[in-house]
Amino acid sequence: MYYERIIDRHLKEWAERPVHKPVLLRGARQVGKSTAVRHLGESFKYFVEINLEKQPDYIELFKKDLDVKRIVPQMAAMCGTPIIANETLLFIDEIQESQEAIMALRYFKEDMPDLHVVAAGSLLEFVLDDIPTFGVGRIHSMYMFPMTFDEFLQANGEQLLLDARRQANADSPLPTPLHDKLVGLIRTFMLVGGMPESVAKWAETHDYLQCQEVQDDIITGYEADFPKYKKKVDSQLLVATMRSAATQATNKFVYSQVAGGYKTAEVKKALDLLIKAGILIPVTHTDGNGLPLGDEADESYRKLLLLDTGLMLRLLNMSMGDISSITTHILTATAADLVNKGPMAEMLAGLEVLHYLSPNIHHDLFYWVRQAKNSLAEIDYLLSRDMQVLPLEVKAGVQGGMKSLWDFMRDKKLSQAIRCSLENFGKFDYIDPKADNAVRHVEIVPLYAISQIRG
């Protein structure tokens, strides 16, 4: 059964354009790239899928030259399916197996512009490093991630609940029974995560243990890929770094906490590879004085998120041996405790923010921390709205417990902020006595409704 994905809309829009560049679909392994392309293929008269890892004979077609007018008819002859402009979707999967095939993508735009071509690959980012000008301006990249909470709801038959939630806002919050149901479902989503196979297993069985088996298999697959990342990189170091990132999630990453006694430079290299593979998501400190946020980024202060909450819990289990107390906390803690104690709510919020952004460009996440000695002031995420910096705090509680937010807004002269929690939709104004009674407008967005944050 196919579950709707955000990327579907963007792929369909691309397919309907009169002028369309070849698409390079990028993202970590097993986030659903191939499945999404196959779904798109159902809207074409013909669909041709070529997997260069499973069908290496096709790689030979690209070795003679990059003449796509020669290559395409030969592909059609080998697969026995017509490859016709405007009638066929050509999907080249695991394209990282052939640098020549990647380089050929640019010529589809130049020599066969009416043919719809999509390419994808599991370890694509490492190969692209070696082809710095592989097709600038001639190839369109789209970025794909695990499933969002909205996609999770749809996969579990909760479209009506999703529709009701989309009608709610700060002036018209949800009825308590619907709010409570969504809080329960977001707890489940923290455990199941958004990897499509895990979501499908939950929709089928509602068995957390079976989902955990799927998650363990995915992690095992990631670790099996490590030797393919780069030559002379210690696979055990990559394993240790990934597991340390899980234990340090949402805190400033400390290189020395990686087990094994590795040098900082070695850990940094491993970290960069895991980020490139899409397994780790960096959240970089910025001063937050204005847009773009990246102009003041400081990579020496980085937090790291795992690409998926369910996978993070499995990694914690592998590192700590038993996470039953964490699982119990997620399922039974009060809403305030779940948000304020532990990294799960903050991590989920960051991932959701990232996943709802346009897939047509690469996005970075940012946060702010006061770097003065003995300072604990920190804002979880910095976004943008109406050409202004928009701070987002993942926090449940009263106004007085938001000192970092008030300090930041005062320093940057901001009037708008978001508090993300497991409260219902709402808003409040804070009169800042330290800034001539300036008014700070705070919108309360439930953790289950991050897709409704207006950018």
Image (cartoon, grey):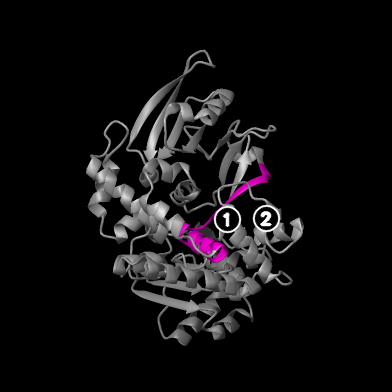
Which residue is at 54% across, 83% downward?
58
Magenta residues? 298-320
Please, what secondary structure does the residue beneath circle 2 have?
A: helix
Furthest toward the top, the residue is: 436
Residue bearing mark 1? 247
Q: Are marks 2 and 1 in contact (CB under 8 Å)?
A: yes
Amino acid type at mark 1? Thr
Amino acid at pointer 2 = Gln
Q: In this view, does 240 lie above or below 303?
A: below
In the rendered image, is residue 14 in sight? Answer: no
Q: Is residue 162 found inside the magenta-colored segment of the image?
A: no
- Where is mark 2, residue-wise? 257
Q: Residues within 10 Å of mark 2 (few under 14, many from 20)?
A: some
Say which quadrant the N terminus sits in: bottom left
Q: Quadrant of residue 294?
A: top right
* Picture layout, residue 320 above or below residue 255: below
Q: Which of marks 2 and 1 is nearer the N terminus?
A: 1
Q: Position of residue 126 (x, y in %)?
A: 64, 66
**In the rendering, at what x and y percent does residue 67 appear?**
58, 75
Q: Give the side of residue 167 with respect to residue 115, left or right.
A: left
Q: Where is residue 86 in the image (x, y as percent from the top left)?
A: 39, 68
As for residue 316 lying within the magenta part, the answer is yes
Q: In this view, does 444 lie to the left or right of 216?
A: left
Q: Distance between the residues labelled 2 and 1?
A: 9 Å
Q: Where residue 168 sits in the image (x, y, percent)? A: 28, 39
In depth, the one of 71 and 228 nearer the eye is 228
In this view, 268 is above or below 204: above
> In the structure shown, which secondary structural element does the residue marked by tag 1 occupy?
helix
| Front residue of 387 and 330 | 330
In this view, 309 is above or below 353: below
